Image (tube, rainbow, N blue to C red):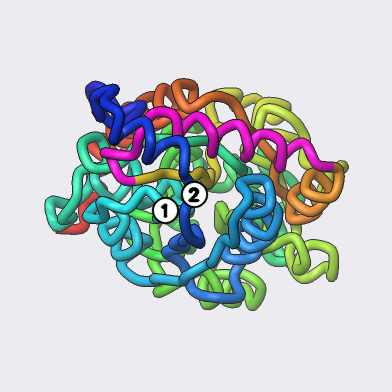
Amino acid sequence: MAGLIIAGGLLACPTAQAQQASWPRQPIRLVVPFAPGGPADALARFIAARLGPELGQTMIVENRAGAGGTLGAAEVAKSSDSHTLLFSSTGALVIIPAITKNVNYNPDRDLVAIGLAVNTPQVVVVAAKSPYASLSALLAAAKAKPGALNFASAGNGTTTQLGAELLKRSAGVSITHIPYRGAAPAIADVIGGTVDMMVADAPAVSAFITDNRLRALAVTSADRVATLPRTPTTGEEGLPDVISGTWYGIMGPAKMPHDVVERINASLNRVLRMPEVDAFIKGQGADPRGGSAQEFASFIRNESLKWGKLAEQAGVRMD
């Protein structure tokens, strides 16, 4: 992406200054483009319950699930209300816009980056009864019989597919993709042994790993995950380039005033430093992030380049 918006372009007129000084004037909507009850919804609600008081207003979470998170993102992109925010992810901001033309918003033009909240690493998992006890054993089998092994994903163009595509390309192996309609049925078939493996988001599989229904072979992060301390990283397994996952951040409409962006960003950073927030996020197998709005915008640009290039190389399209 070229030139992700850092703040709205309001001129410093008395009216604009008055609007900024009085913000927030009403309850703040946090649009969560995922279904209620899932890991992303839980993270959003936990953060919102503390972010609202930091901003001096009630924060209302509204779920707008559908189309990989793009329905909710489009709603916020079309809004001119600085009291409407988006708790969005890799898919709606980076991946889906790169692999389809059927997105009726431009993240670069229509949204403003406010702050990176959470990063969720992925885990390479197999069934507990799988013959593969390590990532190296799995990849050796894939090299011996190209295309014979398969991997499940939550659907075409999801981070679970692209995480596996990154692993395949870095390791130089061929593993057949089997897309599902959502993570739950994909994970179920890995547990049952119908599919050989999956590169899944940590919160979605942590309980199954703890219950010995899945075996974790590696985490796709630079450091080990707190909830899986005995699971090596892909770097430890000789694949340092395999860093993948799903991240979540807060965005606003493109015309949101700069002062409002900075105020929300500062409040978000304070929330992420709260001990109970840190503990909750890490307990989900994720990591609290934070940083400036500018850093988040730069992060999104880099992620767009990385995953857009990989999707093109792997022939991943949703058109």
Left/right of residue 60 with respect to residue 162 in the rendered view = right
Q: CA distance from mark 2 to mark 1?
A: 7 Å
Closest to the observer, 171 or 228: 228
Badge 1: residue crowd in 10 Å (few <14, some 14–19, many ≥20): some
Residue assigned mark 2 = 24
Give the quadrant of residue 201: bottom right
Do labels 2 and 1 touch, CB within 8 Å?
A: yes
Left/right of residue 17 with respect to residue 217 in the rendered view = left
> Is residue 153 in view from this perspective?
no
- Amino acid found under the numbered disc labelled 2: Pro
Q: Is residue 201 magenta?
A: no
Left/right of residue 223 with respect to residue 10 in the rendered view = right
- Magenta stretch in the rendered image: 253-274
> For numbered disc 2, what is the local secondary structure?
loop
Q: For residue 58, which numbered disc appears in the image?
A: none
Closest to the observer, 64 or 186: 64
> Is residue 282 in view from this perspective?
yes
Magenta stretch mostly in which secondary structure?
A: helix
Q: For residue 83, which numbered disc appears in the image?
A: 1
- Amino acid found under the numbered disc labelled 1: His
Q: Is residue 268 magenta?
A: yes
Give the quadrant of residue 213: bottom right
Figure check: 212 above or below 146: below
